[in-house]
Image (cartoon, coloured by chain):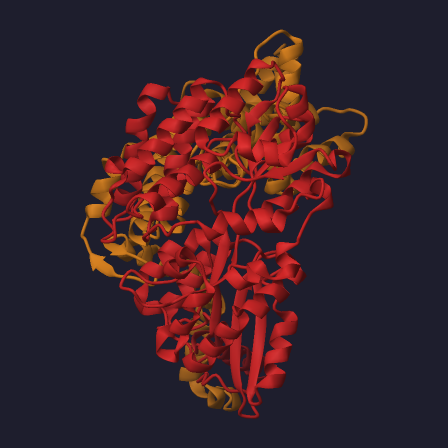
Amino acid sequence: MATTAKVPPRGTLAARADLKASPYLFVSPYFLLFALFGLFPLGFTLWVSLYNWKLAGDKTYVGLHNYRFLLGDDGFWGAVTNTLGMFVMATVPQLVLALLLANALNRRMRGRLALRMGVLLPMVTSVVAVAIVFSQLFSHQYGMINWLLSLLGVDRIDWTAGKLPSWTAISAMVDWRWTGYNAIIYLAAMQTIPSDLYEAAALDGASPRRQFWHITVPQLKPVIVFTVFISTMGGLMLFAEPMMFGDGRLDGGSRGDFQTISLYIVQAFRERNNYGMAAAAAWLLFLLIMIVALVNYLLVNRVRGTK
Amino acid sequence: MTRVLRRTRAVALAAVLALVATATAACSNGDDGLDANGNIVLTVKVFGGAGFGYDNLVKQYEKDHKGIKVKYQIVTDDYDNEFRPQMLQWLEAGSGAGDVVGIEEQGVGQMMSLSDAWADLSQYGLNSRKKDYPSWKWELGHTGDGKLAGLGTDVGGMAMCYRTDLFKKAGLPTDRDKVSRMWKDWDGFTKAGEKFVASGVKSAFVDSPNQLYNTRMIQEAGKADGISYFDRHDKYVLGKNKAVRTAFDYIKTLNSKKIIGKYQNLSDEWKKAMQADGFATMACPAWMMGVIKDTSGKSNAGKWDVATVPGGSGNWGGSWLGVPAQSKHPEEAAKLASYLTSTSSQVTAFEKISAFPSSVKGQKDPKVAKLSDKYFNDAPTGKIIGDSVRNFKPVYFGELHSAVRAAVEDVLFGMVQGTYSPSEAWPKFVKAGQKVVDTSQ
């Protein structure tokens, strides 16, 4: 191709080809990179998932054995339950809170800019830092939360023992970090809603609450769909928070109460050197995300339909 | 104008193509393990915060061996989560592993199951090193099919660290010889625990179940047939193994007497407990003493002391050096590995980073044997640790030993934590290990 550079394109054929082909060429780097780092790993993972694949060891074709094993494995189903449970526990309050927060920030008030920046601050802190601080707050013997509970005369809770306590702690971490992010997105969308809608509603005597539910929320629908999608992906791929909460281990507590699918995947290849099983679990996670995203999409659509 | 535009476009187009071409043309430089001057380059890859303490040894080796250059690399401080997976990828790829590499206890079972990946060191006359090592350390450096693939560097050994102030409060002896005698065997340890609990001192007697369990289990297995979770054909035999059951039942008993705390080793909670008098004793390999010093800090100096471990022997941690089969210069690499693991090198590394020698002679070297620690009331830690590994018996690990160990220790910890009832714990314990075996097949 060095020669093409030296020879200037001549004649109508070259000119036409240039006109037709170059736009594709200019966007091609993205697609090439996507193919290399997106599609190829996806396909390769599918291929690996059909093998008993050991790094630096044997690779034997096992067909759908890995999938069959996972679908019959209570450990995997436990991880699915934990992931979905934490997803619901974290995402629902997160988005509702973000919406209310955005609505509040959309009002006229002092120091609005500082407040708006403030809700974004948790976003820029590293997950690990957040997880360390929260793990300390939720520490069994020496945590602040148990200390407060003991002041109220409530027994200490061992937050890592049991599903409900551990899910609560991890959801709190996730929400602390992501609520502001969603709030800012909602806020940006709110500011594009024409103010005459509100003025007309106000003239008709609609209370702020009615305005919020009947103007703001329907107008925000596309953005809400977007945030639901993003939170679905993030929520179902939850990894760093439960790992840090479990002191860097992949087991999700002594009984696997907060082992997410991502942790299960990493455990399968890190601890057990079974890339085939990990790949199959990754594909099942991919399918799960698709299903949950679809369900969410239908649900969100319905919310608007019944307004 | 159009012409200029066209030309710029053509150039841009070519640039894009060129970029793609360079991106796709993978770098393929033939590496023969030689540098520009024809010297043999040997790469040593190790891990750990301070590495293996080889900086000066490597320089000396280069000086003594003309024509050999050594690249000493500390890849990461985390063996199990970073170095081990990375090493597997290098071994899989067939390049990048280096010529002499570190293998930690946590990964030795798995690495030794990959027989093809390692050079046979006995081919280079290194069977002669057998006499330098206690038998277990030597045995663990062999692959499943009996190839010598790893030469021992350091060991963790095992002792019990205990808090003299809390012992005094509970009416237990504080002198280390008396304490060692008090828990000479495991029943003695139970009795001491009972006395401690009865005294009403608020701390837990021991931090957590797992290291006690492991120490006892390996002692029992060593006394019997040297088998723990897998037999020598890598068949899962945990459920039928007497040594495992004895150790499990022992922890169950201690737990029923409320002798064990719920502090997962090395967790944040555990570190805080150490500072806040959360527990009175803990399993203490050589490297753990550094952790205690760093964690409990100056304010607790002199409160800790060191006694022998119940049953007299134990080990937690320690490493080997192996030569990957992919090395371009396995013979030179084997010689370097032998030099770096020699008794005198082990003593040098001990002086540099406190890695306790696995070499029997190294342990008797006055610099090591006379080691004592001010922080621990001048306890003769060198002698205590040395004694604990000398009588240690070899136990076979197998590929999945570490993975099974992690899973069954979860159940053990869960029993103490209360997530498993004591009556369901044993079946769960056996099942957890079985699950690891199933998931890896």
Task: Please name the color used to draw chain B.
Answer: red
Residue extending farthest right: A110
Q: Is residue B405 visible?
A: yes
Q: Nearer the viewer, residue B253 or B77?
A: B253
Hey, which quadrant is residue B300 in on the image? top right
Asked if residue A50 lies left or right of residue A199, the reply is left
Q: At 45% from the left edge and 38% from the top edge, which residue is drawn? A: B311
Asked if residue A121 lies left or right of residue B72, the reply is right
Q: Nearer the viewer, residue A305 or B432?
A: B432
Q: Nearer the viewer, residue B436 or A282?
A: B436
Q: Quadrant of the N terminus of chain B?
A: bottom right
Tag count in the figure? 0
> x, y percentage for residue B395?
35, 50
Task: Please name the color used to draw chain A.
Answer: orange
> x, y percentage for residue B203?
61, 22
Asked if residue B210 lies left or right of residue B376, the reply is left
Q: At 60% from the left edge and 82% from the top edge, which residue is drawn? A: B62
Residue extending farthest bottom: B37
> x, y percentage for residue A39?
37, 58
